[in-house]
Amino acid sequence: MLVLVIAYTLGLALKGDDFSPLVDGWLAMLSVWAPVLVGCAAVYRVGRGQIEVGLATAALTMNALADTYYLVSADADGASPFPSPADIGYLLFYLLLLWALAVLVNRQLRGSAWSVFLDTAVGSLGAAAVLAVILSPVFDSAAADPLSLGAVIAAAYPALDLLVVAALAGIVASHGLDAGKRWMLLVAGLVVFAGADTVFALQGDLYTVGTPLDATWNIGVVLIALWVDSTSLPRPVRDRRAAATATTVSALAVPMVSTIPGLGVLILASQVTVSNLAVALAGATMALAVVPLVGRQRVLNLLARTDDLTGLRNRRAFNADVPTRLAAVEGRTSALLLLDLNRFKEVNDSLGHDVGDRLLIQVGIRLNRQLRAGDLLARLGGDEFAILLTDSAREDALTVAVKLRAALAEPFILDGITLQTSASVGISLYPDRGKDLTALLRKADMAMYEAKTSRGGHHVYDSDDDSHGETRLRTLAELRLALTDEQLVLHYQPKVDLGSGAVRDVEALVRWNHPERGLLLPDQFVPIIEEAGLMHTLTQVVLRQALDQAVLWQAQGHPLTIAVNLSASSLVDTELPDRIGAMIAARGLPSSILALEITEEFLLNDRGRARGILTRLREQGIRISVDDFGTGYSSLAYLRDLPIDELKLDRSFVFPMAGDARAATLVSSTIALAHSLGLRMVAEGVDSGGAYDQLVGFGCDFAQGVHLSQPVSAAELDTWLADRRVADTASAHARELAPAVPPGDLVAEPAEV
């Protein structure tokens, strides 16, 4: 096919003006029938799967039949009567190709956004307007005798050319740079064919057979046949990123480029006479071009006010809307609530930002469900949300804060992971605490951090919070330095074996050796670490120091198992078991040297995740202990399901034993429960000898508390242990030297007991 069309084109250029049977006859016919054969081969390959291939092949066949009739009916000078049956074939060629294009465009644009359809229409009308200007003489000539068949057919050709060019422009507008090589073959073929038609129409009676213009039609037909052939072949895999980039460029360029032809035609019409059809097409182009531009501007305005993650208002929209709402209430009491998720940074660090993002989306949905239709909800950034309650007093704001916190306390299930989160809410009241948004936000922020520090969940701003906020910020800055400057130290509290009196376990408790404020207890700085998302860093510091101390005690010949408290947020990290195992192995310690104390909160939030992490830790030989046992609102089922070695009975159960028989019974029953499950029981908060003796009587395994020893530094603990070993040795020696007592003398007086 390609060889034939090249030969025909060269023959027309070299043969001269006379009719040549070889060039104008055989080569002309072969070069139009070869594309038909290519199309038939394509139809055979695709069968009935692609109707556009069959339609395009039928169009090529109609064109070949029309050319054959035209050549056969031409006289010696190459002229043929007009109109003739050949015109039927040419017109059917156009109609069948337009049908194929309609099928293609419908398939390509199915499910597309309205903006794509508008771009297609704008491109089509703009191109048609330009061609209408070029073909104005032809339309004017046909209009002179509108009732004759020749005039109708003469007008049909430029009209169909308009439709073809409009369809091509629509294809380019909808596909842009993403059209691909196949589409470009079709576009090029139709452009060449329509161009030849336009020149033919403008020549009128001056056209003769055998000029280079004839080759232009054949070249267009060959390009269309190449498109038909390529369409029937498997589609190559394209680079999606490149395609997406090209589509984006096209979407931005089409509205601008498509309006230029329409605007040019309207400007030309203001200077010279232009056909009414061209002016109408240009006007329609400009009218439709405005629609997507207005729509895009509205979308841009909406996007500028919307948080792209949650779909809520963003900070910009909140800042714009709140002053309007406050002005509308004319000084009546309203409330601004600032809500922040607790320990959200640890979710991002442990589970990844994708999980954190999905959590924020769900948080936004839950918050929105708890608010009235007139309340303003916005995500200010990160895990911080703001709510404006108009016409709401202090009590109303407190009620809403409780509802919001309760809604967020319900577990979130994300990708099979159950997450438990909580929130702190700061409240500032308008107009008492501020008459503009800036003041209200600043004071709500102070109140929110007061709620975090006090762990009260929510707090209404008062004047004392100003100093608290400054203290918190200063403390946070000092804490960041303390984590890297060895200011955090460990104190150790021994656990005494109630059966033998031996000490083989200690609990590591963190302290802050503040350079100015002295030794600070955990409740003075750990809440700030949690709200700042620094718990992972603190955990690493504590584990490193505890294991380093374990190395020293082992070298001294007095190895002690060290228990370290882990927060629920630290245990969300699935890589934690591997990191802890690596830290132990790097120091050459046995895994049994470490025990981890976890809270019921972690066990209840996600039992499946807890089982996986705890199993991996326990498989390494690390002992697992449940701290503050009995304080959670829990089911005892987790004692059966999870790999646990030890329970630590909370001090709130131990303290009232001396004067409360029911409390003593509860402690005794809990110890019996632990033993029946094969677990050790450790009693915390043993502050008196009476409590110690009761626990011995109940069969408790271990005890720790100030009656035995305060949490002390490693050096002080070494001294305490040495003194205890000396005392134990002296006691054992005294028992060896004491005379035997006859059995009858073992009865003691009640006072002695």
Image: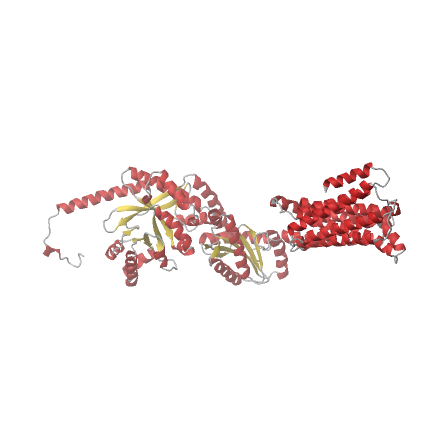
Residue found 30% across the figure and 61% down from its top: 666
- Whole-percent x, y for residue 22 in the image: 80, 40
Viewport quadrant of the N terminus: top right
Q: In this view, does 510 lie above or below 752?
A: above
- Whole-percent x, y for residue 748 in the image: 14, 57
Q: Which residue lies furthest to the right in this view?
A: 144
Pick the front one: 238 or 408:
238
Left or right of 611? Residue 14 is right
Viewport quadrant of the C terminus: bottom left
Number of numbered tags placed on the structure image? 0
Left or right of 154? Residue 648 is left
Pick the front one: 748 or 417:
417
Residue 461, visible in the rendered structure: no
Name the colouring of the figure.
Answer: secondary structure
Pick the front one: 510 or 55:
55
- Whole-percent x, y for residue 620 in the image: 35, 45
Q: Which residue lies furthest to the top in this view?
A: 14
Pick the front one: 219 or 387:
219
- Whole-percent x, y for residue 130 in the image: 80, 48
Residue 380, visible in the rendered structure: yes
